[in-house]
Image (cartoon, rainbow, N blue to C red):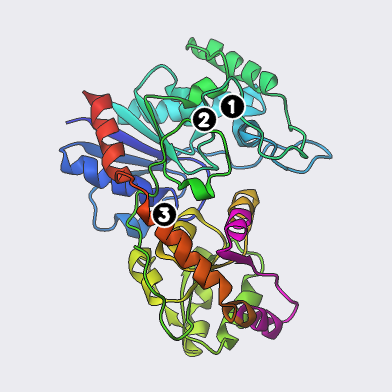
Amino acid sequence: MARILFAWELGGGFGHAGPLRALADRLAAEGHDPVFALRDVVTPAPLFRDRRYRVLQGPYWPKPFALRGRTHAINSHADALALSGYGRADELAAMVDAWDDLLAIVKPDLAIVDNAPTLALALFERIPTIFTGYGFTLPPAHGRSFPVLRDETPPLIAEMLLLRNVETVQKRRKACAPETLTEIFRGRFRALTSLKELDPYRIRQDPELGPLEAMPAPSMPPYQPSLFAYVGGDYRGLDSLVQALSLLKLPVQAFLRDDAAAHAPFLASRGVRIHGNAPSLAEIVPQVGWVLSTGGHTTTHAALMGGRPQILLPIHLETRMTTDRLVELGVGKLLEMRGQPHDTAAAIAEIVADPALPATAGTVADSIARRQRRPGLDRLTEACLEALA
């Protein structure tokens, strides 16, 4: 029996812990011992209530790196590293030391890393590592530098300076230093858990595994228009959106994550069906005609694969890029909040009345379903077992 560390350091919601748990279930069935180190142990706690896995609080960068006079626009994944601890050698060292201490406690035989960049450095050339993630969080790493995401945005810090910080930290730890930043993120296997339709990178050598969680098959939408809304407390326009949802003249189901759950009693009193825990999207998507979300990975993939058009409220660059791609595909619509809640409700009703998006969503979902892809969870499980052999 091997001990396997499943780690998540950056990002929010269920999009990281959910896929990791799905893989842990497979490997536990093979007799191995999963241990989790999570950025957030509270929000995804319902995912682990019926499991006996150990769940630890993982180290994470508590505040973004600040550059005087500069906004935190992202040019490439190197900028994401700069904002997550790599920007200063002493602070990067503190983060790596914390992960070193956790590794000394867990003593893993294999590490599964999902958007955990400082753990990746702590693990470099020490423990077999498998990187998993979706398009934005798992950038191509085969080259000597990370590909640019946005040409119009200059880098926050040159990759060479970030690499110099890495070299300083590794020298102090008496550990092997990489020749490039990208080398840190190669590992034994890289599992891209996105579909190519939502991958922001056009040049990639990683295999397309697709989502690890259960996803809906394409299906005909209900005859009567209906909506499923999934929103967390991190959406700034939450109060106005909740009011708008309460005014809609169509059946609405909703899951309100973390702080947003405070609005659940109000919506329930207005006839909205509230899900107290994160529902299975494989079950929910076929029940509704439309999906509204802030553009998270799991929700957007479930709607895309199930053939449902999407109404999107992006909250940061990652979800904005996903929104842009869904709009380009003709299966998504950006919702522009219109001052008063009744105006937003009218905007939603106007979108739902458009027959073009549902038709295109069904066509795209059928196209995805016809692709001959081996189930990603099967392939990733095999890669883990091979790394342990």
Is residue 283 in view?
Answer: yes
- Mark 1 residue type: Leu
Q: Name the image quarter holding residue 90.
A: top right
Q: Mark 1 or mark 3: which is in front?
A: 3
Q: Is residue 73 above or below residue 304?
A: above
Residue topped by disc 3: 368
Residue 1 percent coordinates (x, y): 16, 31
151 displayed left or right of 360: right
Please tell me whether residue 342 belongs to the stretch shown in magenta. yes
Query: SS at mark 1?
Result: helix
Residue topped by disc 1: 92
Residue 16 percent coordinates (x, y): 43, 48
Mark 1 neighbour class, 10 Å CA radius: few under 14, some 14 to 19, many 20 or more:
many
- Mark 2 residue type: Thr
Q: Is residue 176 above or below residue 251?
A: above
Q: Nearer the viewer, residue 295 or 6?
A: 295
Q: Mark 3 or mark 2: which is in front?
A: 3
Residue sitting at x 49%, y 53%:
297
Q: Is residue 24 above or below residue 354?
A: above
Residue 194 percent coordinates (x, y): 45, 46
Asked whether the beta carbons under mark 1 and mark 2 sit within 8 Å of each other, the answer is yes
Determine which of the numbered discs, if any, sits on residue 241 in the image.
none
Q: Which residues are magenta?
A: 323-348
Residue topped by disc 2: 118
Residue 104 percent coordinates (x, y): 35, 25
Sequence-wise, the earlier of marks 3 and 2 is: 2
